[in-house]
């Protein structure tokens, strides 16, 4: 089938099966185009709870689909590619977190949503890059173990100096790649461009930015900022939304290409197959859902930055 035929079939199956398609901003353009909702990881988790459908097809990495399942246990949650995982999430296991927590004398565990679901079951509260600062500020406790992203964690540490934030040593391989040399070169080539980067970027990159924020934060910043050129420090899938909302503006990605290969595993073919054969279903046991729900719901009750 051609892409246009696949899109038609997907929309037909979606209607027949009362399904909704949620797509993260890092998905390929064709998937973002036909999704019911595009969003960042926090918005998609919240959106999943509001949509009235029998099936949720989550086009993102596995921890995102797991979060949707935890929040909507009665719904069938599908991910088109079961191997679409987040390497950052895999940098912390439940056992490692429990061990570290004990060694450190029981600090409050704040886990980034980019964790596998069993890590959430032993976390006190979750956060996303959109609300991490507010989540940590909201805590009564003063000692925090921030799992697993050291870059987002160090950004939070800078913003919430009144608390002791202990960092895990994980990182996102996509954002970790950015070099100050590439960014300097882009800034020289486009001296009027504003620089907007994701907080998963290393500190040296964040220090050169005009704006630091989640994918939705970057999208809002670009729309409301009166500049014609922007240097973007996050995965290139974000360009779909940026170009759609800002037809006259120019965008340059740090290092010219920034691709999360896991996000890109989902294709129109796999989305079609997911809807047709109802695969791959996210299945979690009741206890995991109950335990993981607490830190996620606690996070949702905190205001966004
Ligand atoms: P957002 O929470 O900004 O959508 O980011 C998710 C992610 O995986 C960043 O790499
Ligand atoms: Fe994970 Fe990085 Fe891909 Fe985001 S961009 S899903 S943090 S590997």
Image: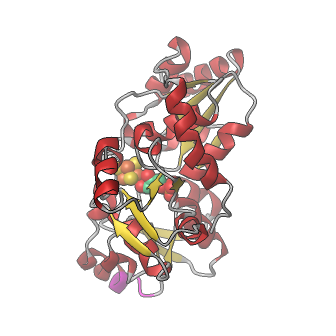
Front residue of 219/154: it is 154
Residue 60 point in image, percent of width and height: 47, 40
Residue 276 point in image, percent of width and height: 54, 14
Q: Is residue 300 left or right of residue 136?
A: right
Q: Quadrant of residue 209?
A: bottom left
Front residue of 20/146: it is 146
Is 234 located above or below residue 156 in the figure? Answer: above
Residue at 57% across, 29% down: 57
Split into 4 quadrants, where in the image is the C terminus? bottom right
Question: Which residue range is magenta in the image?
Answer: 187-191
Residue at 46% across, 44% down: 120
Is 220 located above or below residue 42 in the figure? Answer: below
Residue 13 point in image, percent of width and height: 63, 17
Is 160 located above or below residue 37 in the figure? Answer: below
Front residue of 299/140: it is 140
Prevailing secondary structure class for the magenta stretch in the rendered image: helix
In this rendering, the count of numbered labels is 0
Residue 279 point in image, percent of width and height: 48, 18
- Whether residue 64 appears in magenta in the rendering, the answer is no
Asked if residue 204 shows in the view, the reply is yes
Of all residues, the one furthest to the top in this rendering is 277
Asked if residue 44 shows in the view, the reply is no
Residue at 43% across, 36% down: 62
Q: Is residue 298 left or right of residue 262?
A: right
- Whether residue 190 appears in magenta in the rendering, the answer is yes
Front residue of 58/68: it is 68
Residue at 59% across, 23% down: 10
Q: Is residue 224 left or right of residue 292?
A: right
């Amino acid at each position: 089938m051609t892409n246009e035929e696949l899109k038609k079939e997907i929309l037909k199956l979606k209607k027949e099966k009362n399904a909704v398609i949620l797509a993260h901003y890092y998905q390929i353009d064709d998937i973002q185009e036909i999704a019911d909702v595009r969003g960042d990881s926090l918005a998609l988790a919240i959106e999943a709870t509001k949509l009235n459908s029998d099936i949720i097809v989550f086009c993102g990495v596995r921890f995102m689909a797991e979060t949707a399942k935890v929040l909507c246990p009665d719904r069938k949650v599908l991910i088109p590619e079961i191997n679409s995982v987040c390497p950052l999430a895999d940098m912390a296991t439940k056992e490692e977190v429990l061990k570290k927590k004990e060694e450190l004398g029981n600090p409050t565990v704040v886990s980034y949503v980019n964790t596998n679901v069993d890590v959430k079951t032993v976390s006190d509260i979750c956060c996303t890059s959109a609300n991490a600062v507010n989540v940590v500020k909201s805590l009564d406790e003063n000692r925090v173990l921030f799992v697993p992203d050291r870059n987002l964690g160090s950004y939070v540490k800078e913003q919430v100096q009144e608390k002791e934030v202990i960092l895990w040593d994980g990182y996102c391989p996509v954002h970790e790649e950015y070099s100050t040399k590439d960014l300097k070169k882009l800034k020289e080539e486009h001296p009027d461009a504003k620089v907007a980067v994701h907080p998963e970027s290393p500190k040296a990159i964040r220090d050169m930015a005009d704006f630091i924020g989640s994918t939705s934060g970057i999208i809002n910043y670009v729309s409301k900022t009166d500049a014609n050129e922007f240097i973007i420090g996050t995965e290139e899938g974000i360009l779909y939304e940026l170009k759609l909302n800002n037809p006259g503006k120019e965008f340059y990605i740090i290092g010219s290409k920034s691709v999360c290969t896991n996000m890109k595993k989902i294709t129109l073919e796999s989305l079609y197959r997911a809807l047709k054969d109802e695969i791959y279903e996210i299945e979690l046991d009741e206890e995991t859902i109950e335990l993981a729900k607490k830190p996620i719901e606690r996070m949702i009750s905190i205001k966004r930055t």
